[in-house]
Image (cartoon, grey):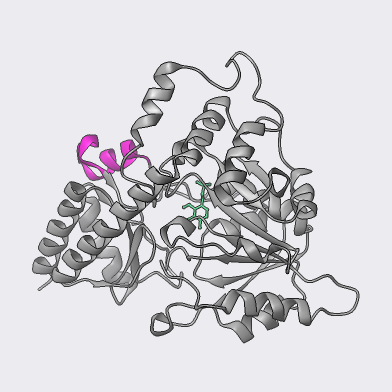
Amino acid sequence: MSPTPMTTTLPGMPASYAWEATDEEIAARYGVAREEIVRFDLNTLPLTPAYVGELLAAGRFETPLAEYPPGDYGRLVAAAAEAYGVTPAEIVPGAGADEVLDLCARAFLPPGGRAVVAAPSYAMYRVITEQRPARLLTVPRLGPGQGWAFDLPALLTAAREADLVWLCNPNNPTGQVEPAGAIETLLEGLAADVPPGRLPPAVVLDEAYAEFVGSSLLGLRERYPRLVVVRTASKAYGLAGLRVGFGLGTVETVARLAVYRPPGSISTISATVVAEGLRRAELMRTNVAAIVTERGRLAAGLEAAGWSVGPSVTNFLAVDFGSPERAGRVAQALLGRGLVPRTFGAGHPFAGHLRLTVRTPADDDRLIAAATEITAQEE
Ligand SMILES: Cc1ncc(COP(=O)(O)O)c(C=O)c1O
């Protein structure tokens, strides 16, 4: 059984996102104390940065909480522009990267249209596409031997008459990046081969994990004006609970996204704290460096326990158990110990894998100890 409780499906309606089970639900279902539960399934940072508590205690927000947030989120956008090296007019803010992905679909994917994704990738691309409603064509990624890279010729063929291409780099759940130059080649190929009477597809490049590799393809926006790069405060900045993300592109592209931006979807508290977080690039880089070190230690510990850990440039690891059945058994054994992995449903190209987020050294030690026990019990 997956730790995810349910996907809501109503007759004639697209499936909704399968919400993760809460700590309370997992505690009740597996008979573990709530305090024992560690979320290895959500790809967040293990600790909230200390300045957040200080800011909240000071209670000084950009505007009084009795008022609505500033309509343009001017200070938040200015801080993001500085952090990402663009002008404010090249940024649209949203309630998490997820809301920005939704804005992209509203702006570029008409109902009845077609989107393309290289699978496996982030689950929300399917949900958002089907909610338009539009059709999602999935192009299988090359295998682990080729770093789960996208299949360029197949993707170009599938995207030829598409309205939108979802790209994720570094990719969730594989944890790897596309080979150097691959995305540039894809964009050039898309621009060069446009059927008469059509525009090249919009390309949404989700860089939620960009800070873990320290580079971005944002610079390609002038060469490929239908590119939207998506960033977030949820991952390297450690602020997932605040729900702030950004869409970046040319001024014209961002203006098109902004048409669909709902008023006030980012709270004043979130806007104030994230603006401060974006100004603390040094702290973010320190946190990323600590995660990268800990990732190496966790991967080595799990390998020593007999698990097959794929290479990762992100804050999570993909572990290959060879079959969905074995991955399912291991997931149950972990859940019984309060350790929550990300599982992938039957038929998913990653069904034989578990995805595990790097946490604190103490929590990761619990995972390594569990892996060692589980391997011993399997033998
Ligand atoms: C690739 C990718 N994009 C977007 C998101 C969602 O980010 P946010 O919390 O900013 O909505 C996630 C979260 O796991 C993700 O993995």
Viewer-closest of 278 and 347: 278
* Magenta-tinted stretch: 22-37
- Tell me if residue 349 can be seen: yes
- Whole-percent x and y of residue 329? 25, 64
Quadrant (top left, top right, bottom left, bottom right) of the N terminus = bottom left
Quadrant (top left, top right, bottom left, bottom right) of the C terminus = bottom left
Residue located 60% across and 54% down the image:
230
Q: Residue furthest right?
A: 197
Q: Dominant secondary structure of the magenta stretch?
A: helix
- Whole-percent x and y of residue 298? 22, 61
* Magenta span contains residue 28: yes
Residue located 37% across and 40% down the image:
22
- Whole-percent x and y of residue 220? 66, 66
Image quarter for residue 332? bottom left
- Whole-percent x and y of residue 244? 55, 40
Residue located 49% across and 31% down the image:
273
Asked whether, in this view, residue 13 is left or right of residue 362, the answer is: right
Asked whether, in this view, residue 292 is left or right of residue 230, the answer is: left
- Tell me if residue 16 can be seen: no
Q: How many numbered dots are placed on residues in this image?
A: 0
* Magenta span contains residue 31: yes
Height in image: 220 above or below 247?
A: below
Viewer-closest of 117 and 81: 81
Residue located 63% across and 54% down the image:
128
Asked whether, in this view, residue 228 is left or right of residue 200, the answer is: left
Height in image: 105 above or below 320?
A: above
Asked whether, in this view, residue 143 is left or right of residue 95, the answer is: left
Height in image: 182 above or below 343?
A: below
